[in-house]
Image: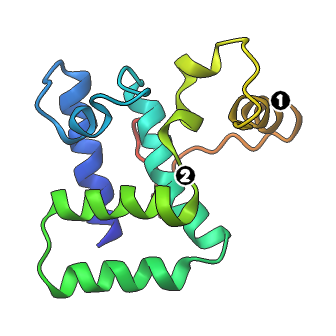
């Protein structure tokens, strides 16, 4: 189910990058501080909902939610909404923390560690993550 959802989100990203404004990503970001967020930044954010959900101890919760969605026959829009809700409410994953346009600001924001963490994992740790072709959890758009 996660792979199908990730494929669907990638399709939405392709539509968005192709200039089609009627897509789930643009709708999700509409009227938020991340409205102009790049599509690849959004894909990074969406993948981290799953990654951080598992990494920080919410795997059982996330899997139960996805199984429930599968059992009830939820559509891709519903899965997308449930995952983004889970990301914000449970996994602590928020679009502004992935928005490289916002990260270019030199204004210090004491409520966000995204800018310094991104710099640190890209330059000091070498942790910049790319999609696996065998077991993709990240969109090939990254």
Disc ID at residue 36: none
Tell me the residue at 33%/56% (across/down).
Answer: 6
User: For this view, does 79 lie left or right of residue 138?
Assistant: left
Q: Give the Cα separation between the discs numbered 1 and 2.
A: 22 Å
Q: Report whether residue 132 is seen.
A: no
Q: Which mark is residue 93?
A: 2
Does 87 sit above or below residue 46? below
Quarter occupied by the N terminus: bottom left
- Name the residue at 52% across, 45% down: 94
Give the image location of residue 96, x and y in percent: 53, 34
Q: Please report the residue visible at 72 percent of the width from the left and 26 percent of the height from the top.
A: 109
Residue at the disc numbered 1: 123
Question: Of the residues under marks 1 and 2, which one precedes in the sequence?
Answer: 2
Q: Position of residue 112 (x, y in %)?
A: 70, 36
- In this view, the residue in front, 130 or 19, is 19
Element type at mark 2: loop
Q: Nearer the viewer, residue 128 or 41?
A: 41
Quarter of the image holding residue 59? bottom right
SS of the residue under disc 1: helix
Pointer 1 with pointer 2, Cβ within 8 A: no
Residue drawn at x 73%, y 11% is: 106
Foreground of the two, 108 or 82? 108
């Amino acid at each position: 189910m996660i792979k199908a959802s990730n494929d669907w989100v990638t399709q939405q990203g392709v539509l968005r990058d192709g200039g089609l404004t009627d897509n789930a990503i643009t709708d999700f970001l509409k009227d938020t501080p991340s409205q102009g967020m790049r599509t690849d930044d959004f894909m990074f954010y969406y993948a981290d909902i799953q990654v951080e959900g598992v990494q920080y101890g919410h795997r059982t919760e996330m899997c139960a939610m996805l199984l429930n969605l599968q059992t009830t026959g939820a559509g891709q829009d519903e899965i997308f909404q449930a995952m983004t809700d889970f990301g914000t409410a449970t996994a602590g994953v928020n679009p502004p923390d992935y928005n490289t346009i916002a990260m270019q600001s030199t204004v210090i924001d004491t409520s966000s560690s995204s800018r310094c963490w991104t710099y640190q994992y890209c330059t000091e740790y070498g942790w910049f993550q790319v999609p696996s072709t065998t077991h993709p959890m990240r969109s090939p758009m990254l």
